[in-house]
Amino acid sequence: MATREYTAFTAILRYFTVLCFCGNVLPQIRYSIAEESARGSVVGYIAKDLGLDVNKLKERRFRIVSGSKDGFLQINQDNGALFVSGNIDREELCEKSLLCAVNLKTVAENPSEIHYIEVEIVDINDNSPAFPVREKHLEIPENAVPQSTRLPLDAARDSDAGLNALHKYTLSPNNYFELDIKTREEDKIPFLILKKQLDREQTPTFNLTLTAFDGGKPERSGSVNITITVVDINDNAPLFDRQVYSVALEENVEIGSLVVKLHATDLDEGANGQVVYGFDKSLMRKEFEIFEINSNTGDIIVKGSIDFEEQRVYELDIQASDKGQVPLTGHCSIIISIKDLNDNTPEIDVTSLSTDIVEDSKPGTIISLISASDRDSGENGMVICSLTDDIPFELKPSFQKSMYSLITKDLLDRETISLYTITIMCKDRGEPSLSSQKTIQINIADVNDNSPVFTQNPFYFYISENNTPGTSIFSINAFDIDQNENAQISYHILKAEGHEANMVSYLNINLVDGNAYVYALKGFDFETTKMFQFHIVASDSGTPSLSNNVTVNVFIL
């Protein structure tokens, strides 16, 4: 196994696929590997763990058919190892998710097998906590109340996850301020708490350092310098009607729609009591792209498209500031729950095992593996698939939800239909229901199941005596409705007995332009022979060969 800062490959857990009523496909094998692992690093010996014969991997076309969209994982078909083929950046793949995994689907043929693999991307401590700015300037009135005065600070961001993410803050030693940390999901937002009454005339400014540490080993850190100016004005901060607003909003709501109307009051008068609203600067950029706030009215408005499948809950931190010389700020949170609509059509994935199927295939022969998914939730995401036409094929449901096998239902006959265009229709259970379809073509391959057929049986020919030896006296023709070599016909004359044997010995047959021409090697004598009979056999070139014969009656004139 390859290593970077620590061992890249940790533990391999092997699971068997089990029946799951939640609709998700459980992986048969789970691996893990550290991000930034060197190219060529082995994730695990996937063929061995699946019990596959390593010597037959190329013959069975063992491969990855979905997952690893950026192509950073590949299978070595010489030894069956799953290895790193590109750069793995966990932060780019999964941002700050605690669990970062890549789901792979592999297929082997002859016989057909499909397996599901999960590869966990393990975070390494390759990012330090960072603040939005290097310098932070704050102002605070000298009559601010100790323990009740909270000054919001910009939160540090760390792109790593888990223990390597932001862990704690420290504040440089001082007698007037202490830290309070608000935890929201994975974010830790620092606030300065005033713990002692200020005196601007005694200490007009404070210079503090806020340092953020992650939990890695060794730990990494980042800091911001905070300058606090003490003034003696405006001693009331705006106060919201509620600290937390909860709102439900449908996805795909029109741009410009009102989300919620906020209201905050300030007990001061004049400019010190005039309130303006804004988003807290600690919000992610995405929230700024989707919502906007009217600074004068406090109305939260939809600014961009809202998609339930991208994010189901938004939490916005709002601040209300007065217009005093040194503005004071109040805070509230808005929790916006997004309602799912049936706005996604089912997605159909077809894994074809073969584009040709022989016409003598038994009913139940598997042609393709079909899986369907829908990004919606609940009934909107439940998918049922069917075939649109009455054809000798059917979809057989798998024990895994929304997975099917396309199999033959009846016996096939290439001579009747040689090509089938199969349309697979998948519908969800939403109201109204959405659907999508996928079309595949199946060629019916020929088998040698038809014998040659002569254009008539028997044949009657009339020949004048004293014919010229070596010339053609008549021709016959047979046809075969099979294809290729199964339809290539050769001819020969059967041996006869008695008087006919003597006559047949002077006959020869040759194939010219698809017709069989019979030649006489001597002239006939009416006074000796007035009529004779023999048989010609037509055989195709199939394996095994099929044949038919015809009776030929020759009359000498």
Image: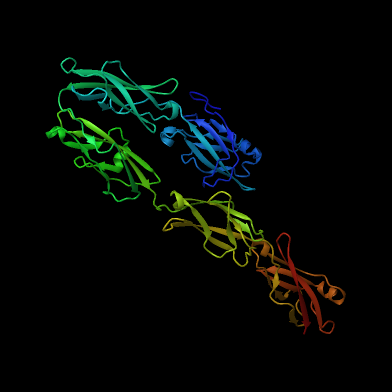
Whether residue 440 is situated above or below residue 320 in the rendered picture? below
- Determine if residue 465 is in view: no
Q: Locate the C terminus and report the quarter of the image it occupies.
A: bottom right
Q: Residue lying farthest left?
A: 270
Whole-percent x, y for residue 474 in the image:
72, 76
Residue at image position (16%, 36%) is 274
Q: Indicate the quadrant where residue 243 lies.
A: top left
Q: Residue furthest right?
A: 498
Against 333, is 132 above or below? above
The quadrant holding residue 125 is top left
- Which of the image's four quarters has the N terminus? top right
Left or right placement of residue 32 versus residue 333 in this view: right
- The answer to which of 395 and 539 lies nearer the viewer is 395
Picture coordinates of residue 96, whole percent (x, y): 41, 33
- Confirm whether residue 179 shows in the render: yes
The residue depicted at 85 percent of the width and 82 percent of the height is: 528
Residue 58, x across and y down, in percent: 61, 42
Q: Is residue 93 above or below residue 233?
A: below
Q: Please tell me how many numbered marks the rendered image carries.
A: 0
Instruction: Please report the residue visible at 78 percent of the width from the left and 83 percent of the height from the top.
Output: 556
**Is 224 drawn above or below residue 268 in the view shown?**
above
Q: Looking at the picture, how far across and down is residue 419, in whole percent?
A: 57, 62
- Would residue 478 appear left or right of 149 to someone viewing this image? right
Of residue 54 and residue 434, the one placed in the foreground of this image is: 434
Q: Nearer the viewer, residue 223 or 93?
A: 223
In this rendering, position of residue 482 left or right of residue 39: right
User: What colour-coding does the image apply?
Assistant: rainbow
